[in-house]
């Protein structure tokens, strides 16, 4: 695995230069290695991220997506909403998993950086000088995996297979196709959610 090349692509994909995204690349690469699986071409392995919506640190997820091939598009990555910087990578084929969490000392080091101080003052990531970003990215990436992460092997981990739904149906109002299980029936006719007036 050419990690430098992956990082270069990952920065392009991600859009700005931060420290948690490359940490996610390292996290995902370690998870693949520990589980002895390849990057997902299809929907196995599955990445279970413990982060929550709206939590600072979501950048980590983009790094994990790029390196593991577990993507929101394919549906083999999920957010568990625990508010923690950890990943469990599960192999459906092997029925095993590995949990990788960022060591607290690493987060303290990141938090005390000038980069994080600028962020805390509200400076957008893209407005932080490259040197300031690299001043924390480089020492973090120079660390060994065992300095960055705690690793726990989960000898048995069974994930239920979730079949993909292919059936679509036409909305009686806008005429657009809607997945059958998301259509709403109003007086016996199918509608998409926006046309049905249905509020979840
Ligand atoms: Zn970022
Ligand atoms: Zn409609």
Image (spheres, rainbow, N blue to C red):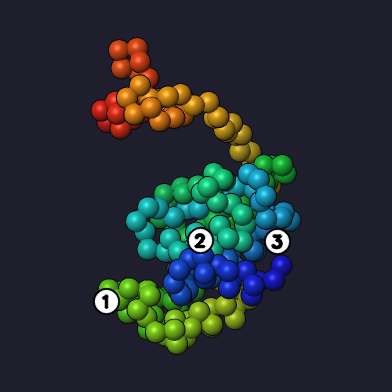
User: Image quadrant for the N terminus?
Assistant: bottom right
Which residue is the site of mark 1? 121
User: Image quadrant for the C terminus?
Assistant: top left
Residue 33 numbered tag: 3
The numbered mark, 1 or 2, whose residue comes first in the sequence reads 2
Which residue is the site of mark 2? 62
Distance, label 1 to label 2, CA atoms, is: 24 Å
Q: Position of residue 104 (x, y in %)?
A: 47, 69
To which quarter of the image does residue 44 belong? top right
| Furthest residue toward front | 175
Residue 57 numbered tag: none
Tell me the residue at 31%/17% (across/down). 186
Q: Position of residue 24 (x, y in %)?
A: 54, 65
Label 2 near ligand 1 (CB < 8 Å): yes
Circles 3, 2 touching at the beta carbon (< 8 Å): no
The numbered mark, 1 or 3, whose residue comes first in the sequence reads 3
- Which type of secondary structure does the marked residue at label 1 adopt? loop
């Amino acid at each position: 695995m050419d990690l430098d090349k992956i990082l270069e692509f990952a920065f392009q994909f991600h859009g700005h230069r931060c420290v948690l995204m490359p940490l996610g690349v390292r996290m995902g690469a370690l998870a693949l290695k520990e589980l002895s699986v390849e990057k997902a071409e299809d929907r196995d392995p599955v990445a279970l991220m413990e982060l929550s919506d709206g939590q600072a640190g979501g950048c980590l997820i983009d790094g994990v997506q790029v390196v593991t091939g577990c993507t929101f598009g394919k549906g083999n990555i999920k957010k568990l909403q625990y508010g923690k910087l950890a990943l469990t990578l599960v192999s459906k084929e092997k029925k095993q998993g590995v949990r990788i969490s960022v060591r607290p000392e690493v987060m303290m080091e990141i938090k005390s950086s000038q980069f994080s101080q600028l962020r805390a003052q509200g400076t957008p990531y893209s407005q932080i000088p490259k040197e300031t970003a690299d001043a924390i990215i480089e020492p973090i990436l120079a660390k060994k995996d065992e300095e960055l992460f705690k690793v726990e092997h989960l000898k048995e981990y069974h994930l239920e297979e979730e079949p993909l739904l292919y059936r679509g149906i036409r909305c009686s109002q806008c005429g657009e196709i809607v997945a059958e299980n998301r259509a709403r029936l109003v007086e016996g006719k199918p509608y998409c959610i926006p046309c049905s007036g249905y509020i979840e």
